[in-house]
């Protein structure tokens, strides 16, 4: 369709920009889109504003399996080069086919460990600490190489994993990890460091440690805390400071406001019928979110006659996975969330000291919401977002108290942190001492303060006022370059240590591999300073627990605790904390709205910046926005229009005199008048992957407003920034059956409401050859009602299946390799749409269009119904991806797999081929796991048990949304799910008979609000 | 007008046309023969090893069971090349000064592995599993030949895909009772085909369609 005669075209063209890229090429005209949306009642779902406008560019993306430019040589004058290279590579390929396989060496053990069977992985329990929580893990080890993590079901994280844990294996093998100890940039030995630091310590002894400062991140490790306490006892005038940039600053302050003491809040969603989230992304971020996601989705599992569901109300500025699960979601500016919380608390009769909030758009909820909450006293829950103000946290405490939820859905314990100080005050204290020249020895154990402390402190300059600066870190980063000594530390998979989960449960962490680069843990560095350099982390951690243990059987207790991955009875005791009377008087008054609001949030992928150099996380499409490799200033459509900007424009954002340039991204469902920026980008020393990506939002984050404030100004300064969102790549036609959903009331009235919606052609209406499946027929069901769209499955799949990272330029050309994608779909008004997430792996069709077109039978039907992909046969015609209606096939346009870097070779899963260039690949249902289970079962002369095979995506899913199994067995979980009335196939009208099916999303809106 | 081509050109053209066909067929035959030959497959070639280990001596003369060294053949995908410790179990007592065994002692002293050259080397995209074959009644000898007659180890079969598929299509031609899996020089007491079919049923060996599905070997 040409531009002129396309009545729906609401874009105007930008001369010279690549046409295939909807973001870059064409500028959105938002009033046009809005008018269109009002007119087009037929359009139920849309993927993006570009889809909504049905632009030529989007149509082009939709009709192709890869974007137009994916298969073209982008370099201008290179046709000759191309032919030259092709000629050379053909010749080489021909020649190499004639050479014999090179000789391979076998290097057996000298003394083989008894429990080790070569070729069979062992699993060891440990945990990954992050902030004030941890994820319990079982780490897969192949002959001593950790290759993949799985969740530990005995841990409070219930056996699920988040993206950070899944990607942490790549962090271990990161070739950019610092490999040597340096003094002012020159390599030194640990002995040299010991000599230098002992001199400083001796001086401090005389001064009682008056010049000694220790700066750490939040510490939950009981052993490390004990060591620091011992150190402080030996040096009574020394001080311990903490700074965790994305830490629990607000909830700590909120607890002090409400209770006068720091407490840790733990939720139990099993008993919560009505949940109100005040900007809390409790399903996908923060300590405990894995557990909460599992408990939450268990209450939304509609099966057969069981049609009871919980109800979730969410107010938030930026759409989060939690927001997408809401039955009622309202985009509110972050500051308005507090105002709404005041109004809601007052209406609920909670103690607000008579104060009410100013008016917000969510006020229309108040009456029905209050009624709903009061109907469910003791079975409701109000959750305050970690990034909300202290007052919101205090209000949530007050509301939960008023609703009788405390002790039922809300539990209070002692803090998880070893020393829950006000970290901003702690930093100010340190800066005061630095200014006074009182710091002789500054020991920075982990963290990157030169990069991420509040900007007004000017920490980079002030840091230099410490006489001797020592920094312990995984990588040489922004802080290392300002310190005298840089000490390489151990990755969490390389050391003994301990950490606490969100409820306080301790895990004793055990190493999976000896330190790759002579690093030392914080335990070992501290013990060095106290004159015992020979003690190892193992000695230190074990000695600490031996001292804690009562009874004579310590060795057995220790072995069991290490083996299980949890130390029994270490969850913190719940306690009752009374709300302080008149607390509300101490809450700060609302600040007047002036200008735009800026909202700082930790990035979903790189967190506070510590994961910047992790290629898996950088390339992982962030939930909902589907952005990769960048952060952006995220605007709502209306606010973007008011400021005259569109996606991929560059704006200069100014706030409190700090200025920076940021690309614009328009997110439907974002709050108007508010701009979200994610922290963790703009690193200047992160490594080959993470350096100079995005903009550094820490550059305008002050301690007065760690998370949000008014007063942002945005001015357009440029356009056509290369901002890559994969949302429109691999697009399916949203006018067809992609997402199915219903309200639960509708479903109760008519359970066939989903399946009535589309016709399934009769199975025999096909020219495809029929297959019989005598023994196993593998299938998958994905419950969209449980899926939160957190995206952990994508990284789990990448880790399991040796999927390559391609880089931003290649993603921009549509050449990213993820076998599993999570599509977002929107429904309704662009200001506040319903958002649905749909994980899309290979459908393993029974009538598979890909199989018939392969000229070399590199993809063929297995006896168990898998569409096998044989890499060694593939010649790269790409007919199969051309014919795949689901666009799940990925092609190695170039040599994306890294065959050279030695450390990365250790990470690979030995059970999956590493693919070279020119080869098609796709989801295999983790066929290596299927085969292992099948072989094991046959050796034991039995059938594979239901649940014995878990695909990588299924094993990691916090919501248990993905279920895999044998559909020939009517009792298997997957067969049961496929019998549900909500079961439907993606594009099932094509009669591909997909083995992967979906259970429709159901919502449970409040009837009073619906009317 | 005079003839352009002389009469004898007919013969010449016939020779050219038929000759081309034969030449092409010959080229194909050469390629196929070369590809299946021991030169490419390494069938029958002895590889240089750091120690001239003799299976004749250990298996035939001493009567050591395969599993004494290849410990994981029944449990894992790999049969396991024995650690130096296994050699030293005996050779710390016998032949403990033999110069030929110095690399073994050196390895045991230093903790450095002995680097053997792999004899049976499948491509990296092939996922062969020893344990399932051994458990389903495929003898060591079926793939590795008369190891007890190999003074120096060599590859007895081509290990090409065609050869694998022969057995995956007709397992009854090769299976033997489980008790005979580790026997060298086994002769079936009855008709192999009849016994094979019985054993295939008894050991629940999967049907040819499953055994020849691509993912059985390629992942």
Image (cartoon, coloured by chain):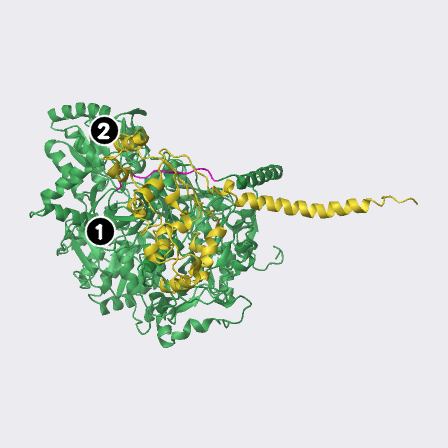
Q: Pinpoint the chain carrying mark 1.
A: A
B68 left or right, relative to A556: right
Q: Which residue lies at the image location 19% right of the left edge and 32% below the top edge?
A: A213
Residue A268 location (% of width, % of height): 22, 60
Instruction: Give the CA separation, mark 1 to mark 2.
Output: 36 Å
A473 left or right, relative to A220: right
A387 left or right, relative to A568: right
The residue identified by callout 2 is A435
Chain in yellow?
B
Q: Pinpoint the chain carrying mark 2.
A: A
- Crowding near pointer 1: few (<14 within 10 Å), some, many (20+)? many
Residue A107 is inside the magenta segment: yes
In the rendered image of the structure, the colour used to display chain A is green
What residue range appears in magenta?
A101-112
Q: Nearer the viewer, residue A219 or A128?
A: A128
Residue A392 location (% of width, % of height): 25, 54
Q: Earlier in the sequence, mark 1 or mark 2?
A: 2
Q: Are marks 1 and 2 on the same chain?
A: yes
Most extreme residue toward the right is B1
């Amino acid at each position: 369709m040409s531009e002129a005669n396309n009545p729906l075209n609401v874009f105007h063209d930008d001369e010279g920009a690549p046409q295939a890229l909807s973001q870059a090429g064409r500028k959105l005209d938002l009033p046009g889109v809005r008018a269109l949306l009002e007119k087009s009642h037929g359009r139920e779902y849309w993927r993006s504003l570009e889809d909504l406008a049905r632009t030529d560019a989007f149509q082009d993306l939709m009709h192709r399996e890869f974007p137009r430019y994916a298969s073209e040589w982008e370099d201008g004058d290179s046709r000759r080069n191309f032919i030259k290279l092709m000629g050379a590579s053909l010749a080489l390929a021909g020649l190499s086919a004639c050479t014999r396989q090179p000789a391979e060496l076998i290097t057996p053990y000298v003394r083989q460990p008894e429990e080790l069977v070569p070729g069979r992985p062992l699993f060891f329990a440990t945990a990954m600490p992050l902030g004030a929580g941890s994820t319990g893990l079982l780490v897969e080890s192949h002959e001593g190489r950790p290759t993949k993590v799985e969740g530990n079901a005995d841990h409070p994280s219930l056996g699920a994993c988040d993206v950070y844990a899944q990607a942490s294996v790549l962090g271990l093998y990161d070739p950019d990890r610092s490999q040597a100890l340096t003094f002012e940039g020159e390599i030194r030995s640990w002995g040299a460091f010991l000599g230098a630091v002992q001199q400083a310590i001796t001086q401090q002894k005389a001064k009682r440690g008056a010049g000694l400062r220790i700066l750490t991140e939040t510490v939950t490790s009981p052993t490390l805390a004990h060591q620091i306490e011992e150190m402080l006892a030996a040096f009574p005038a020394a001080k311990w400071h903490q700074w965790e940039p994305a830490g629990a600053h607000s909830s700590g302050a909120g607890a002090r406001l409400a209770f006068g003491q720091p407490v840790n809040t733990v939720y139990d969603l099993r008993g919560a019928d009505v949940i109100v989230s005040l900007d809390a992304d409790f399903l996908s971020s923060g300590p405990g979110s894995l557990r909460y996601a599992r408990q939450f989705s268990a209450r939304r599992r509609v099966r057969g006659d069981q049609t009871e569901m919980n109800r979730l109300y969410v107010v938030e500025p930026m759409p989060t996975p939690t927001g997408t699960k809401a039955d009622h979601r309202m985009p509110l500016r972050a500051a308005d969330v507090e105002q709404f919380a005041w109004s809601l608390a007052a209406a609920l009769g909670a103690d607000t000291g008579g104060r009410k909030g100013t008016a917000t758009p969510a006020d229309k909820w108040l009456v029905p919401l209050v009624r709903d909450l009061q109907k469910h006293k003791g079975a409701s829950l109000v959750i305050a977002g970690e990034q909300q103000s202290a007052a919101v946290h205090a209000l949530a405490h007050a509301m939960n108290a008023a609703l009788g939820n405390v002790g039922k859905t809300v539990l209070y314990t002692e803090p998880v942190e070893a020393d829950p100080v006000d970290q901003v005050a702690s930093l100010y204290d340190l800066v005061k001492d630095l200014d006074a020249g009182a710091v002789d020895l500054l020991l920075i154990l982990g963290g990157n303060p030169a990069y991420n402390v509040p900007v007004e402190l000017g920490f980079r300059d002030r840091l230099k006022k410490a006489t001797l600066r020592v920094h312990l870190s995984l990588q040489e980063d922004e802080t290392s370059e300002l310190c005298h000594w840089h000490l390489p530390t151990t990755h969490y998979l390389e050391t003994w240590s301990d950490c606490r989960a969100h409820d306080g449960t301790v895990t004793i962490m055990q190493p999976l591999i000896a330190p790759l680069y002579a690093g030392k843990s914080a335990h070992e560095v501290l013990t060095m300073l106290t004159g015992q350099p020979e003690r190892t982390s193992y000695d230190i951690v074990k000695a600490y627990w031996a001292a804690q243990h009562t009874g004579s059987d310590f060795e057995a207790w220790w072995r069991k605790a290490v083996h299980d991955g949890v130390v029994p009875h270490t969850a913190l005791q719940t306690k009752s904390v009374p709300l302080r009377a008149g607390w509300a008087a101490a809450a700060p008054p609302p600040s007047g709205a002036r200008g735009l609001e800026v909202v700082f949030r930790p990035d979903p992928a790189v967190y506070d910046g510590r994961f910047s150099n992790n290629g898996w996380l950088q390339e992982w499409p962030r939930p909902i926005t589907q952005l990769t490799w960048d952060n952006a200033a995220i605007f709502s459509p209306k606010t973007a229009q008011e400021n005259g900007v569109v996606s991929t424009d560059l704006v200069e954002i100014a706030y409190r005199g700090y200025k920076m340039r940021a690309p614009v991204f328009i997110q439907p469902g974002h709050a108007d008048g508010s701009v979200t920026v994610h922290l963790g980008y703009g690193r200047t020393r992160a490594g080959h992957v993470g350096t100079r990506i995005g903009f550094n939002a820490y550059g305008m984050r002050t301690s007065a407003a760690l998370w949000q404030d008014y007063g942002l100004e945005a001015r357009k300064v440029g356009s056509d920034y290369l901002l890559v969102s994969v949302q429109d790549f691999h697009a399916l036609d949203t006018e067809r059956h992609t997402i199915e959903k219903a309200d639960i009331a509708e479903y109760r009235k008519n359970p066939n409401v989903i399946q009535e919606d589309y016709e399934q052609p009769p199975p025999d209406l096909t020219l495809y050859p029929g297959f019989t499946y005598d023994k196993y027929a593998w299938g998958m069901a994905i419950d969209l009602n449980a899926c939160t769209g957190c995206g952990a499955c994508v990284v789990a799949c990448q880790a399991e299946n040796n999927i390559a990272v391609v880089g931003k330029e290649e993603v921009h050309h549509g050449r990213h390799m993820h076998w599993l994608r999570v599509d977002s779909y929107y429904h309704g008004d662009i200001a506040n749409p319903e958002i649905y997430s749909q994980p899309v792996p290979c459908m393993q069709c029974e009538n598979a269009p890909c199989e018939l077109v392969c000229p070399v039978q590199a993809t063929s039907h297995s006896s168990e119904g898998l569409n096998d992909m044989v890499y060694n046969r593939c010649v790269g015609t790409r007919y199969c991806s051309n014919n795949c209606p689901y666009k799940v096939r990925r092609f190695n346009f170039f040599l994306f797999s890294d065959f050279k870097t030695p450390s990365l070779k250790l990470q690979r899963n030995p059970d999956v081929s590493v693919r070279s260039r020119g080869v098609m690949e796709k989801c295999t249902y983790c066929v290596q796991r299927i085969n292992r289970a099948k072989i094991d079962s046959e050796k034991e002369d039995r059938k594979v048990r239901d649940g014995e095979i878990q695909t990588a995506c299924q094993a990691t899913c916090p919501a248990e949304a993905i279920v895999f199994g044998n559909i020939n067995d009517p009792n298997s979980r997957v067969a049961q799910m496929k019998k549900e009335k909500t079961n439907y196939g993606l594009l099932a009208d094509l009669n591909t008979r997909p083995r992967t099916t979906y259970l429709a999303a159901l919502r449970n809106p409040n009837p009073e609000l619906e009317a | 007008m005079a003839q352009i081509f002389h009469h004898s050109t007919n013969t010449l053209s016939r020779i050219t046309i038929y000759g081309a066909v034969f030449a092409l067929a010959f080229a194909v035959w050469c390629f196929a023969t070369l590809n299946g030959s021991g030169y490419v497959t390494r069938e029958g070639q002895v590889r240089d090893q750091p120690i001239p280990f003799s299976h004749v001596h250990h298996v035939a003369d001493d009567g050591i069971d395969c599993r004494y060294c290849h410990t994981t053949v029944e449990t894992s995908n790999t049969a396991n090349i024995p650690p130096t410790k296994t050699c030293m179990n005996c050779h710390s007592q016998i032949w403990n000064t033999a110069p030929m065994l110095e690399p073994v002692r050196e390895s045991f002293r230093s903790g450095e592995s002995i680097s053997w050259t792999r004899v049976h080397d499948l491509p990296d995209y092939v996922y062969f599993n020893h344990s399932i074959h051994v458990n389903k009644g495929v003898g060591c000898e079926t793939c590795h030949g008369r190891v007890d007659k190999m003074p120096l180890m060599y590859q007895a079969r081509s290990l090409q895909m065609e050869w694998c598929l022969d057995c995956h299509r007709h397992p009854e031609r090769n299976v033997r009772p489980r008790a005979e899996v580790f026997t060298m020089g086994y002769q079936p007491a009855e008709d192999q085909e009849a016994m094979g079919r019985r054993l295939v049923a008894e050991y629940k060996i999967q049907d040819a369609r499953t055994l020849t599905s691509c993912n059985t070997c390629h992942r």
